[in-house]
Amino acid sequence: MDGMPVGHGLEALFAPRSIAIVGASDDVTKIGGRPLQFLLKYGYTGAIYPINRKAGQVQSIAAYASVAQTPEAPELAVIAVPPAAALDAVKECAARGVRAAVILSAGFSEMGEEGSRLQTLIGQVAKGSGMRIVGPNCLGAIGVPQKSIATFSVALESSFPDAGSVGIVSQSGNLGSFTLRLASERGLGISRMLTTGNECDVDIADAIASLAQDPGTSVILCCMETCRNGDKLRQAMALARDAGKPLVVLKVGVSEAGSAAAASHTGALACSDAVFDAVLRQGGAIRVPSIEQLLEVGHALSVVESGRVPRGNKVAILTASGGFGVLLADAASAQGLALPRLAQRTQERVLSIVPFASPANPVDMTAQVSSKPEVLAQVLAAVAEDETCDALILQSANAFFVPRLREVFLSALTQVAREHPARLILLCARAPQDVRAQLNAMGFPVVEGIDAACATLAALVRFGAREARPAALPTEAAQALSPDAFATEAGAKQVLARAGVPVLQEVVARSREQALAAARDIGFPLVLKIVSPDIAHKTEVGGVVVGVRSEGQLIDEYESLLARVAQKAPQARIDGVLVAQMVQGGTELILGSKRDPVFGPMVMVGLGGIHAEIMKDVALQPAPVDEAQALAMLRSLKAFALLDGARGRPKADVQAAARAVAALSRFASAQERHVAEIDVNPLVVLDAGQGAYALDALLVPDHMEETP
Amino acid sequence: MDGMPVGHGLEALFAPRSIAIVGASDDVTKIGGRPLQFLLKYGYTGAIYPINRKAGQVQSIAAYASVAQTPEAPELAVIAVPPAAALDAVKECAARGVRAAVILSAGFSEMGEEGSRLQTLIGQVAKGSGMRIVGPNCLGAIGVPQKSIATFSVALESSFPDAGSVGIVSQSGNLGSFTLRLASERGLGISRMLTTGNECDVDIADAIASLAQDPGTSVILCCMETCRNGDKLRQAMALARDAGKPLVVLKVGVSEAGSAAAASHTGALACSDAVFDAVLRQGGAIRVPSIEQLLEVGHALSVVESGRVPRGNKVAILTASGGFGVLLADAASAQGLALPRLAQRTQERVLSIVPFASPANPVDMTAQVSSKPEVLAQVLAAVAEDETCDALILQSANAFFVPRLREVFLSALTQVAREHPARLILLCARAPQDVRAQLNAMGFPVVEGIDAACATLAALVRFGAREARPAALPTEAAQALSPDAFATEAGAKQVLARAGVPVLQEVVARSREQALAAARDIGFPLVLKIVSPDIAHKTEVGGVVVGVRSEGQLIDEYESLLARVAQKAPQARIDGVLVAQMVQGGTELILGSKRDPVFGPMVMVGLGGIHAEIMKDVALQPAPVDEAQALAMLRSLKAFALLDGARGRPKADVQAAARAVAALSRFASAQERHVAEIDVNPLVVLDAGQGAYALDALLVPDHMEETP
């Protein structure tokens, strides 16, 4: 199976010509009864083969004693037998030529060792046979247009979802099922749903990929708890991006408590949420914080074609009430949207239509909107023609429930849609279901809540502003590193310098004479530091001297430094004394990389001192990054103002810092198999044009197992 | 009117025995037609007097040509005539002995100068006569039990709210009306609604006070845009607090954009949101960020009697699904709720009931909850008996829609309510309206959304943890300050020192000899600073020398300091040279106060350097604060760890810093009429036990007009 593309072989899950239900039951409260009931109730038109030891009939359909006895090889098998019987069932399906199997039964890795063992064996059947296996312990798959139902989700109890272009994938069966139910209530048409449960074979990346490749799906909603294979997830995100399909992700396990709960729930490693966030952002996914937002953003993206996704974060807000205008302004600001003043000409036009309007932004059209039908169309046209903003929000608490006002609003919106087809106008409004559908069909997303409306628009803005797919950076061949690179500061800095991270001139002196020669070469002032593989904290043993300004002082300090170290760390092997150029001033960054077990090396940068450690003000990205991305990381720091000339400081050499970040990230990426962690602390950034230098550095070795 | 208690004389707004409608109309689309229509439709039982020049009948009721001609003085008058006629109408009402009037008409201060003038004249009628006036430009008042309706709100078009104990007050008519409508949809019973509009007389504080004093109201929901009278608002909050009634406030105008919009909308000064936040917190109000939260928190507080409000932020979460557990854990953490592990004994009990449960917290009861009816009651009992947590959240996406599961849940909840009556259990669940009402009646708040449920519980926790009403701190008589206090650092520090803000020993020397004498008295090392009323930035003229360590150095530095200043600031009057004790080390705070035009002096403290200026990491409170409050301010700083021994530092003398904050706040409060602003920068905080000292200080004078 390795080497197959992500998401391959999953068509049979959604559009099978025939379905076997292994463990089919007459009892519709059982997981073997429910899928069969749903298939019959909702009119699946392919062949249905209930499998039941007793054969005969199940739910009035001819049943078979085993998959081997069905008249044809079923394309899809739904497996609803107890864990102990599942392995044999899976083997039988594979032998019969079934293309995909969904194991609904629970009782596997989530239940302890014996369950885990069984699950591993089942996964091996998938690997060996090419039959894809979903689950176990999942809520299976639904192909909505085909009415193919391989689930026992209660979401289908009362009704079947309307067909549409929104696909849903989830690791948690319950979250997936709940999303499906809310989506149906919200009026979203669904293409496919797939829940992956314990993921013995098909994982969330496969699920995303299968929807990315489905012509019937235009928007993908995803509930994710963990990731077991970073490469596959990246490939799946790339497929969605290349297909132009928005991937909206609710990643749960954000907080420490949530992350611990997710690890206990999924049995998978708890990934750092910051790493996840960076990987999702890099992959062009739109991350949302709640199920409600997952649905709202999915809804908006199913209504707004890609050409109308806003290019920036500037929004014009129109209301008929000052109070709502203030509320929306607050909510928009909280979501990072900007409310620029409209152009003078627009404001004058608005005032000529409504003399007592607030015309700047938010635009308060006043209660005139209710009494004069022409006001709304005219103000909407004036604001839509103004290029100041990237999108509009039109708010109405009540208009769509009042027949007279509804007509005014619909006619004005019809007009603006005709005259400004490229303009995104999001309606923050309550409306009857049929009116909402009508507005959606006209291209207007409708969101009820004020916070929800602004959060939805902000998510669209993030989608519009997502980075282009990063060009693959040249992968440098990893040179073998000498042990010295891991043993001492000097060794670490040498390899980083070769990799393009600037360091100051420095020499390891092994005698007074060498120290003097180095000083003459480098020039004063200087720093002296002990070089020893046995001393991690040099200052604690008196092993650092700064501000050496003359040859006489150098000789004194050289001797007394060695004497102090000899006294405080008598056992330490001494390789010499580092004689290094000294710079003054500048701003200190900390820069580093760390290899994530799932997603590989991540590069991290933050301001030194308390900013990174106490204020958690750091930027993180998957390595490697290029200079532009590195610059964006620096700019994203809350304390970036410190580098940018705040409080009368000179501007720092941010470009040089970005080059150092990018160089370190390339090195971390190339050395992925050998270096687990890199710490540069500090990277001092001098005034603009003066450069940025690693003053101290540490490499932590790691030898990844070569996987076969 | 001044000197009358806040909220006095408003009973006639809600429970009048008779109502006149001035400008009554047969046309029910007009603001003069709507209130009359509502009164008739919903069965107000008092006397109704339509006032209309033509007399005769309006909406089939006998009408009168003027208020003077009604058979009795109406207790309440609703005024719906154009602005130009409103002043006469108000005067007529006052003359007739009407107790309260509501002016629904717009066209006053929101429409420019002429409107403002009219509004002021109307306000003077209220002041002169004692008749309270609501509005103009408002949506008036409703007394729900009395069916007294003085509004034209569309919220009443389709139905009248159910009577209940939740009161609604709002400055914005639209927000108030929208809140009323949502509250009715949410199933909340309403006592009274009052919207205050342009506030020519009755303001939001009066509105809050009138509900605080209404025996029929137990929870007050408030939408606020601005405050025109800080003292009245404080009195109103105190009335609500003393009555034990939660006051839930949606304050709009949080962001810069929102605040600007609010100022333009209300015509009132835009107050700093941080000041508002501090004042509301001090007053014991529960601030919420959205209308949705206003309703959810109002709902919860109408269901949860005060004895069950949680005492702390520790919550136990129970679900039947791991995925929902993770989502809830994230949402709870985001709201500042903690999820401690349940007691070992509880976990063992849970595992004995459900062997494959996750028992720690969140508790995943697994799908067993659906199949074994006894599981839920037993697990609920086990967790409810565990004292680890202050409250429980029980989640169910679906159970209350499935008859069999609904019975299981209702029976388990009935049992736990009987056995643990003091336990707060919030249900995060979707349920049919009637089931929700049933659960509410049993004492369980029901919130649908996951984020909303956690935000609601967090608001209850804040309510439970609100500070006790601050004992009035002793008001010190404000001593007259000499001009020198405002002219120089030394003068400012002298008065601050007298007020209890520690300063280091220092002397203003006017000669070399005095400087030497001071040095002998104080001891080395020393700092020298120029003293001049004309020099604000001492370092810029070379007017500061630190680290003076000997008498010889003192004499040299003294002379050269004066020479530098004479050269760089030849016009400056020189009062002398400050010879001050020098401390080394410590952490720098900035400390200050500023008088808010509405709420009076506020005290502010933050860490020095970039923390306050760039990271906006400051704490703000109304002055004065006591030491405990000052300590809480310091602890609330994000960078508090720096004072608390982070990164191997010694702990700082936080107690001394708190004493200085409290002392400065008392001084700012006592000097309110004379000092507009105080800046202490830095206040250096030494290691624990070593004290905290103002190293530099500035007082900005202001002479408030004595108001008659």
Image (cartoon, coloured by chain):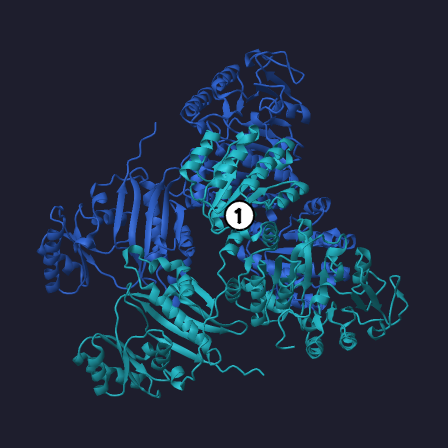
Chain colours: A blue, B cyan
Q: In which quadrant of the rendered view does residue A481 lie?
A: top left
Evaluate whether residue A387 shows in this view. Answer: no
Q: Is residue A686 left or right of residue B88?
A: left
The quadrant of the picture occupied by the C terminus of chain A is top left
The residue under label 1 is which amino acid type?
Cys
Residue sitting nearer the eye, B146 or B492:
B146
Q: Is residue A441 left or right of residue A307?
A: right
Residue A290 picture location, percent across and down: 54, 45
Q: Residue at x 58, y 18 (%)?
A: A74
The quadrant of the picture occupied by the N terminus of chain A is top left
Residue A642 picture location, percent across and down: 38, 62
Residue B462 picture location, percent across and down: 51, 55
Residue sitting nearer the eye, B481 or B218:
B218
Q: How many marks?
A: 1
> In the rendered view, would you say B346 is above or below A688?
above
Q: In which quadrant of the rendered view does residue B68 lie?
A: bottom right
Evaluate whether residue B100 shows in this view. Answer: yes
Q: Is residue B381 left or right of residue B640?
A: right
Label 1 packing within 10 angstroms: few (<14), some (14-19), many (20+)? many
Residue sitting nearer the eye, B662 or A72:
B662
Q: Which residue is mark 1?
A: B454
Q: In which quadrant of the rendered view does residue A677 lie?
A: top left
Q: SS of the residue at dot 1?
A: helix
Instruction: Residue at the far front: name it.
Output: B419
> The numbered mark 1 sits on a residue in which chain?
B
> In the rendered view, would you say B58 is above or below B364?
below
Q: Residue at x 34, y 55 (%)?
A: A657
Q: Is residue B214 left or right of residue A331?
A: right
Residue B645 picture location, percent across and down: 31, 57
